[in-house]
Image (spheres, rainbow, N blue to C red):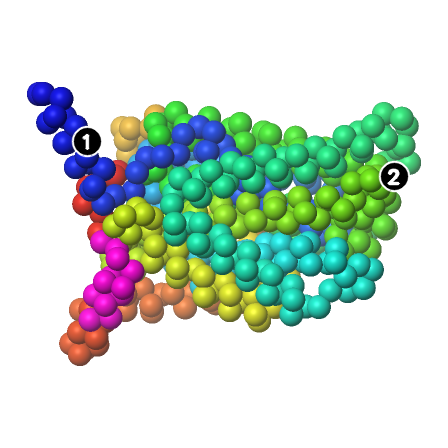
Amino acid sequence: MDETQMKKEEDDKKEVVHLRREISMLPAVSFIIGTVVGSGIFIAPKGVLMNSGSVGLSLLVWALCGVLSMFGALCYAELGTSFTKSGGHYTYLLETLGPLPAFLRLWAEFLFIRPAVASYVSLAFGRYVVEPFFAPCPAPAALIKVVSILGVTFVVAVNCWSVTLASRTQVTLTFIKMFALVLIIIPGVIALIKGKTENFQNGFEVDSLTLDKLPLAFYNGLYAYGGWFYLNFVTEEVVNPNRTIPLAIFFSIVTVTVFYVLVNVAYYTMMTPAELLLSEAVAVTFANRALQGMASVIPVLVALSCLGALNGGFFGSPRMLFVGAREGHWPPIFSMIHIRRHTPLPAVLLLYPLVVLMLINGEIYQLINFASFARWFFIALATLGMLIHRYRFPLHPRPFKVPLAIAVTFTVVCFFIVSLSLYSDPWNTGRSCALTLTGVPVYYAVVYRFRLPHRCRRIFNFCSKQLQILLEVAQQEVQTF
């Protein structure tokens, strides 16, 4: 084969419409760390302390949440290397437990889980950007929401424009947010070495602990760790996934756990538990006390940290919808990608109005427990499905295999936390269950579209075609899994 023909084949391959493998080890690690470290570590310490009742127990909860996240991440490393499709939770439920649980996961993700989490993070971004300009007075709520919407708009634009730009943005923001954590850890550790340990005296007083509040402490901690599964959403875009996914997951979660525990130690070194509970912005209160000369920098770094978490969420979640549409569980338009940008444009754009609507509504602070119930229930189902699949298909290729004890422990603990939360917070978990179950009739309407009247199908197909032309999108021309 001559050089001209080889060059022509390479050019043809570049012109083919498909998602490219562009995520190597560094972007993969940055993607996980950058999605995990968002607003959680700057907001959740208050919720963990409030529900655990003591400094020592709250630090134990943070460490155990890291261990639990590591167990779950290792399970997802096996799932990600066993099933090579993108889509994360949806794909694994589809392959192990069947189409209905998979569709319900997809439905819950886009009905309330992703909009709730993205709204919470973007409002944190808006608050940290706006409040320094109005201190010590409270910032206008409307302005915070406007800035939050601008942040979401920027992230959507980046993810619509280019996969490479989105991954480079993630790498940059990850380094910035790790610098923010180091800036908090160093003065805290220095003060601890100098003997400032009074806040750790009698750290395990459990008089105020009640069993029904403990799952809520774990939910707040696990919320801060949330995001370790997002690399599995983009498996088809990872370079050498059998090696990259397990290594990236392991390195990322160990790093985040160590940093999170040290950050909380730093908080408690400089603030009493009562002061931490009274603080609306823990990182800012800490900075005012420990970093007087750099206190104004912390809100900026926290805002950028939130932006990185938003970027990771908008990069990963649309791939679940993309794969769901490809499998016939969502309108086909959402399985298409831009013919020049090679991004899943319709899937990214669908999230935008849902997040903006929830932002405008503003009723999101109680949604951590609300969204966490459905998220952790389906994660537990996915790892249960992995165990069932192992038993039913022992010869299925598994390039990475997690120890059985870890998989069983993680699954049992997840189901236990989810079950206990039904008792701890029946209102939010009940609503979460009800909203998830609304997907059952939708599933039959979407999957069995031939049951719809002929006129409805014609209107649906016409709208899909016009949207495809308007957005300049097409189906993938090569199989990427």
Question: Mark 1 packing: few (<14 Cα in 10 Å), some, or many (20+)?
Answer: few
Q: Earlier in the sequence, mark 1 or mark 2?
A: 1
Q: Please identify the quarter of the rendering in which residue 404 is found.
A: top left
Tell me if I can see residue 340 in this picture.
Answer: yes
Was residue 463 drawn as part of the magenta stretch in this picture?
A: yes
Tell me if I can see residue 428 in this picture.
Answer: no
* Residue ID at (68%, 47%): 300
Q: In front: mark 1 or mark 2? A: 1
**Residue at the disc numbered 2:** 199
Q: Which mark is residue 10?
A: 1
Q: Please state, as top left, top right, bottom left or bottom right, where the N terminus lies in the image.
A: top left
Nearer the observer, 311 or 70 = 311
Q: Amino acid at mark 2?
A: Asn
Asked if residue 71 lies left or right of residue 43, the reply is left
Residue 102 in the image: state x and y as whole percent: 35, 53
Q: Which stretch is magenta?
A: 462-474
Q: Amino acid at mark 1?
A: Glu
Residue 273 in the image: state x and y as whole percent: 84, 47
Q: Please state, as top left, top right, bottom left or bottom right, where the C terminus lies in the image.
A: top left
